[in-house]
Image (spheres, helix red, strand yellow):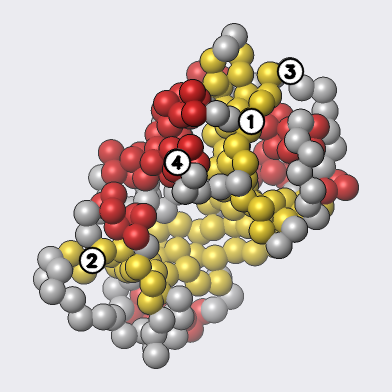
């Protein structure tokens, strides 16, 4: 039996149900009276039969996702050029603006049936939810001349840290600030953890190069499929 879960967060932004399919085998779509519904399914790239079934059911491949990890002992701290501190509510609008202008390679941005302003809104509210106490355990901001130029949102899970979001103001990119934000996890904070995990898309070459440069190793990869159903 196909297992489903409604993504309440994404559904609230898009204005129609977004359903995550947890088991990609023998998929049976739910009957709905809604005019529109979006089904999402992540599949390990090695599961060729499951991928074939999704394609046969008219699912579209929207992104390929890579997961990297690094052990705490391998993350070398450096002397920071930036002023780091934990985020506070005064940072919310600057952080939200950076988030809105970033993440152009995520699966919502790459889905041609999702409007650009909708995909921007998803990450904007995602970042804002930290300040509402709805998402994330820690956020570190990097500042230059009292302005936020970047942020990193962290989740703590099973003695590991997950980089949930990381972004730099578009006017300050290619200066090494993303690397400094990641290294600030050790040099600035006192968070106790074993490993850091982070995900990105195969099309996000700059992020991949950044993680490899720091010493992250690829451990997992999946394909993301979307199916928009209309009644």
Which is nearer the eye, 57 or 182?
182
- Residue annotated with mark 1: 86
Q: Earlier in the sequence, mark 3 or mark 1?
A: 3
Label placed on residue 117? none
**69, above or below 231, in the image:** above
Q: Residue, x 22% and y 59% (percent of image)?
A: 16
> Where residue 177 sits: x, y (%)?
65, 26
Q: How many marks?
A: 4
Badge 3, how many Cα within 10 Å: few under 14, some, many 20+?
few
**49, above or below 224, in the image:** below
**Mark 1: secondary structure:** strand
- Residue annotated with mark 3: 81
- Residue annotated with mark 4: 132
> Where residue 182 sits: x, y (%)?
70, 37
Which is nearer the eye, 53 or 197?
197
Residue 122 located left or right of residue 112: right
Quarter the C terminus occupies:
bottom left
Query: What is the spatial separation of the Cα atoms under label 4 and label 2, in whole angstroms?
Result: 28 Å
């Amino acid at each position: 039996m196909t297992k489903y879960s409604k993504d309440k967060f994404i559904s609230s932004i898009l204005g129609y149900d977004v359903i995550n399919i947890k088991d990609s085998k023998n998929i049976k779509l739910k009957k709905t009276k809604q005019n529109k519904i979006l089904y999402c399914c992540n599949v390990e790239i090695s599961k060729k039969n499951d991928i074939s079934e999704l394609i046969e059911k008219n699912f579209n491949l929207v992104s390929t996702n890579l997961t990297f990890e690094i052990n705490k002992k391998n993350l070398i701290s450096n002397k920071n050029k930036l002023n780091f501190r934990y985020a506070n509510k005064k940072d919310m609008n600057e952080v939200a603006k950076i988030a809105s202008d970033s993440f152009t390679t995520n699966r919502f941005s790459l889905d041609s049936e999702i409007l650009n302003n909708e995909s921007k809104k998803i990450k904007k509210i995602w970042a804002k939810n930290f300040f509402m106490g709805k998402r994330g355990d820690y956020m570190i901001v990097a500042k230059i001349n009292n302005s936020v130029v970047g942020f990193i949102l962290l989740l703590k899970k099973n003695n590991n840290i997950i980089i949930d979001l990381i972004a730099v103001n578009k006017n300050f990119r290619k200066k090494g600030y993303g690397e400094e934000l990641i290294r600030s996890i050790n040099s600035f904070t006192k968070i106790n953890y074993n490993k850091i995990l982070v995900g990105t898309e195969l099309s996000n070459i700059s992020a991949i190069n950044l993680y490899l440069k720091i010493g992250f190793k690829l451990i997992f990869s999946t394909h993301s499929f979307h199916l928009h159903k209309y009644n």
